Image: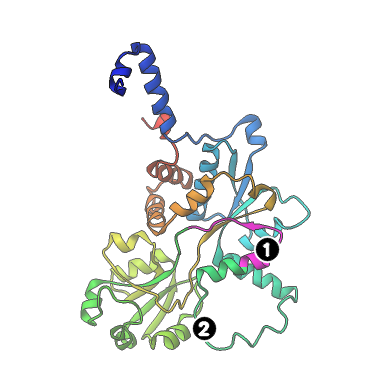
């Protein structure tokens, strides 16, 4: 029997080169090209709020679909994700086919709308007292309940949650274990001396901290994540409650105490689509959801962070290329 090497060497050089080129072309990822002309007219439209990270994730889905010969474009839409997703269930065409949403604001808005419509009459009173925020799967289940005329695709592997961030100096001063969670007794013991900042879109933290962590801070302030992080670094405050995927945590070697009691809940990214197109989704959509893990969220935030950061679409393309899901564009050179 002739070995593969002998058989290959017996082929004409031109034929062998053509075969090598063909195999190399088949083994690499396909390019992600923006749809134009007729393809653009029949492209699926992904609606997303004007938020940099949300837009980056939406562009990941769009570019991945385009790479699999399923034309898609991203459009920024005003209004909450709850209203955007609800419009997919109506009789009128909303002008888009998919909504890229974070599950926490999605469910909050859907439940508020249901309460305004009287659908949740009688439910008040059951939620008295201080309770932890919802778990990721609870939010997915709730969204499916409120959107019977739409379909949720596989949510991102990343579970977005919050952490209490301190410096290593503060941890050492109060004898808090660097690998501890926020329910560490040393944190509770130190809490009444701490000035804590909280992300401004989170609920009132004081009842949650007191009930779930036996923590009554000396002072509580609110602000954006960027403001709070800077205040921790400059010792204007002692701790900040921000998303655990914030790139500044690693950049400044801060200590992130996990929200073990889920005081502020957790969420995921999820595409919401009309069932009519769900059946035509290529496998790349589920693959993207599996690859969008916690590390991916940190990477994306690093890419878009700061004045010199990439735009959401550029960051999405860079991530897809790094993940070997799409080919590197020819103009990258």
Which residue in the protein does label 1 denote? 147
Which residue in the protein does label 2 denote? 131
Q: CA distance from mark 1 to mark 2?
A: 25 Å
Q: How many numbered dots are placed on residues in this image? A: 2
Disc 2 packing (10 Å; few <14; some 14–19; many ≥20): some
Q: Which residues are magenta?
A: 143-156
Quarter of the image for residue 86 reads bottom right
- Secondary structure of residue under mark 2: loop
* Residue 274 drawn at (x, y percent): 68, 53
* Residue 244 drawn at (x, y percent): 39, 66
Residue at 66% from the left image edge and 30% from the top image edge:
38
* Residue 166 drawn at (x, y percent): 30, 73
Residue 207 can be seen in this image: yes
Quarter of the image for residue 117 reads bottom right
Q: Earlier in the sequence, mark 1 or mark 2?
A: 2
Residue at 54% from the left image edge and 35% from the top image edge:
34
């Amino acid at each position: 029997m002739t070995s593969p090497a002998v058989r290959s060497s017996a082929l004409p050089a031109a034929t062998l080169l053509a075969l090598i080129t063909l195999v190399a072309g088949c083994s690499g990822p396909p390019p992600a090209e923006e749809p134009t002309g007729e393809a653009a007219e029949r492209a699926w439209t992904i609606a997303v709020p004007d938020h940099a990270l949300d837009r980056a994730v939406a562009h990941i889905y769009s570019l991945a679909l385009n790479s699999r010969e399923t034309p898609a474009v991203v459009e920024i839409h005003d209004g909450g994700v709850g209203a955007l997703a609800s419009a997919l269930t109506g009789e009128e065409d909303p002008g888009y086919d998919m909504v890229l949403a974070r599950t926490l604001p999605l469910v909050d808005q859907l439940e508020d709308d249901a309460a305004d419509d009287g659908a949740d009459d009688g439910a008040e009173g059951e939620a008295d007292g201080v309770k932890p925020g919802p778990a990721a799967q609870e939010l997915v289940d709730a969204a499916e309940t409120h959107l019977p005329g739409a379909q949720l695709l596989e949510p991102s592997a990343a579970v977005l949650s919050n952490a209490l961030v301190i410096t290593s100096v503060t941890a050492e001063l109060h004898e808090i274990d660097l690998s501890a969670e926020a329910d560490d007794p040393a944190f509770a013991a130190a809490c009444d001396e701490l000035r804590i900042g909280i992300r401004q879109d989170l609920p009132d933290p004081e009842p949650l901290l007191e009930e779930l962590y036996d923590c009554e801070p000396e002072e509580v302030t609110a602000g954006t994540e960027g403001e709070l992080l800077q205040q921790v670094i400059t010792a204007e405050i002692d701790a900040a409650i921000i998303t655990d995927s914030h790139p500044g945590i690693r950049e400044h070697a801060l200590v992130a105490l996990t929200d073990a009691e889920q005081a502020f809940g957790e969420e995921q990214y999820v595409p919401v689509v009309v069932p009519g197109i769900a059946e035509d989704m290529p496998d790349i959509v589920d693959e993207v959801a599996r690859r969008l893990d916690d590390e991916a969220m940190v990477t994306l935030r690093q890419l878009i962070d700061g004045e010199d950061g990439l735009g959401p679409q550029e960051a999405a393309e860079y991530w897809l290329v790094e993940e070997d899901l799409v080919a590197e564009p020819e103009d990258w050179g």
